[in-house]
Image (tube, coloured by chain):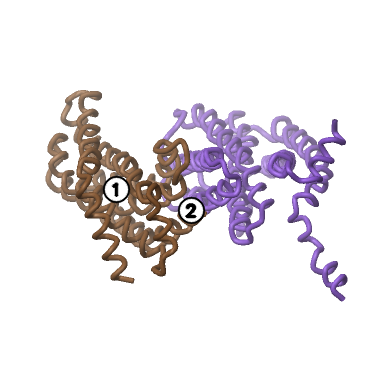
Amino acid sequence: MPAAAARRGAGFFRYASPQQFFPLAGRMMPFFSVAAALLAIAGSVVGFLVAPTDFQQGDAYRIIFLHVPAAWMSMFLYLVMAFWSAVGLVFNTRLSSMMATALAPTGAMFTFIALWTGALWGKPTWGAWWVWDARLTSELLLLFLYIGFMALQSAIDDPRRADRAGALLALVGVVNVPVIYFSVQWWNTLHQGSSISMTKAPSMAATMLLGMLLMALAAWAYSIAVALARVRCIMLEREKHADWVRQYVEKQA
Amino acid sequence: MLAALRCIVERDLLLAWRRRADVLTTLFFFVIVISLFPLGVGPDPALLRTMAPGILWVAALLASMLALGRLFAPDHADGTLEQMALSTEPLTVIVAGKVLAHWLVSGMPLVLLSPVLALQYDLPLPSVLVLFISLLLGTPVLSLIGAIGAALTLGVRGGGVLVGVLVLPLYVPVLIFGAGAVGAEAAGVGVAAHLLLLGGALAASIALAPWATAAALRIALE
């Protein structure tokens, strides 16, 4: 009876152990890397070759295929990071916090890309590299929140304290993400409103939408691949006292 | 609980009184920073009048941030903070008391001094009044949110600058609505929205920040 109960209880949750998740992450990563590359190629072809020239903006609008996926991922990755932080804080699991730490640099990178591609888009269309409207300001704040998270974790030596402190900070900052998302509704901003909504048809050409969605899926697959690779490195560092790590390292050598 | 709150506030006020220099240094930092800007941008009164709310608010932000080093670090250094965490009184209440004392000593002087400093920028009287109210509502929020940052970075190397990196992005909404209120007054648009949002931020911070700060202290103390 106890053995059966143990088997029943394990199931999916055995991947909460770094030793179990490490090989799984290793197997998943190449799949997502290849998916990311293929989706990026498909999205780029659709976006830069197939989609028609915009009536108002000409070809300058094509930066949307980088800007929007990067912006979506920057917000989404923060939410995922906050989720894993919360799980790590509540259930006291090491791996959840390691995952949050692994996600932060990718999220920061996408935020940076979103801000820069936005500036490159804004200059020809709005006439300005930067305006201090609600959405741009809150996205810049998101970059600062990511950097603050990474700075705090790197400043604390004890890894478990760093996990918990970072988790608390991530959760305090998560209130910024809805502000970014709804900023174009709540304020009179220069940034355009949402073209895609849950309730009505998108207000853009079908091929443009397809290109954007393909690039968004590519960015998502990339984020997963990179996060898995990074969390594997973090696991090897943090668990280096464990036998399974020593065996793995010896096998690699 | 109220007795514990009162006890903590009295203790912290007494300790601050004994080290008046620390408190006054932060206040003088506020004054000096405000004096620096006209020297940098030139004495044009119209320009200074437009910039005044922003400058005064940013100086208040920076002064609040600098004062955070005094909030938990001295108690942590001599072991009192651990005793506070172990006590039967809720840590949230103790934190609320410490933040209240901290604001009375670091935040309130800024609020009281702001009308005088606004004179350096030739702000008209209605704007000075709105500035006073916005700082009165906003500086407690700065202390409350700053307490979370101070608790997270307790004993961590990198010190004051790290607290700044963590806490200044969280301060931004307060800055936007605080300086925005004065700007709205100067433009003749209503200030009610800004001040009400500041009040809302204050209410939310009073409710939630001590709890988050207590959690951060427990993380730092274990």
The vertical placement of A70 against B132, above or below, is above
Shown colour of chain B: brown
Identify the residue position indicated by label 1 in the image. B178
Mark 2–mark 1 Cα distance, whole angstroms, equals 34 Å
What secondary structure is marked by label 1? helix
Farthest residue to the bottom: give it: A1
Residue name at image x 53 percent, y 41 percent: A156
Residue A50: image x %, image y %?
73, 33
Front one among A200 and A238: A238
Query: Could you say which is closer to the camera, residue B216 or residue B59?
Result: B216
On the image, the x and y values in percent for residue B142 come to 33, 49
When asked about the image quadrant of residue A199, the answer is bottom right
At 74% from the left and 35% from the top, the residue drawn is A40
Amino acid on which disc 1 is placed: Gly
Q: Is residue A109 left or right of residue A253?
A: left
| Sequence order check, earlier mark of 2 and 1 | 1
Measured as percent of width and height from the top left, residue B54 is found at: 28, 39
